[in-house]
Image (cartoon, helix red, strand yellow):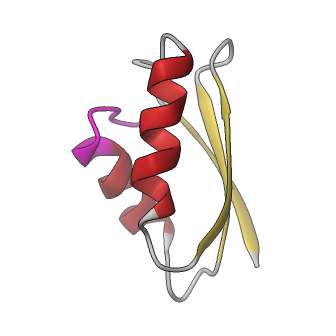
């Protein structure tokens, strides 16, 4: 299990956090999602083979929260 933190500068509120959790919750291999609204970061525990970082970043982008 890997833990990855990504920065998504468009995170502004708890509604954003909920949208991110919903979107990443659909990605196979993602087991835990933590969104820090203040720091504008998303920390994800995931299986690197089932959910590599580019897949997680693409899911964030598709949800409207592109990463830096």
Evaluate whether residue 52 shows in this view: yes
Question: Residue sitting at 47 percent across and 79 percent down?
Answer: 28
Question: Residue sitting at 33 percent across and 55 percent down?
Answer: 59
* Highlighted range, magenta: 61-68
Image position of 26 with respect to 60: above or below: below
Image quarter in which the C terminus is found: top left
x, y percent for residue 30: 58, 70
Q: Is residue 50 magenta?
A: no
x, y percent for residue 47: 63, 81
Image position of 13 with respect to 43: above or below: above
Q: Is residue 30 left or right of residue 1?
A: left
Taking the view exactly as shown, the residue that stands out farthest to the bottom is 49
Question: Residue sitting at 45 percent across and 24 percent down?
Answer: 16
Image position of 11 with respect to 5: above or below: above
Question: Residue sitting at 45 percent across and 48 percent down?
Answer: 22
Evaluate whether residue 68 shows in this view: no
State which quadrant residue 55 falls in. Answer: bottom left
x, y percent for residue 57: 40, 53
Main SS of the magenta segment?
loop
Q: Is residue 54 left or right of residue 48?
A: left
Q: Is residue 65 magenta?
A: yes
Image quarter in which the N terminus is found: bottom right
């Amino acid at each position: 299990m890997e833990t990855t933190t990504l920065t998504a500068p468009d995170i502004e509120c708890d509604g954003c956090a909920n949208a991110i959790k919903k979107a990443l919750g659909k990605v196979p291999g993602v087991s835990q999602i933590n969104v820090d609204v203040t720091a504008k970061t998303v920390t994800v525990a995931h299986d690197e083979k089932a959910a590599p970082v580019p897949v997680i970043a693409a899911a964030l982008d598709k949800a409207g929260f592109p990463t830096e």
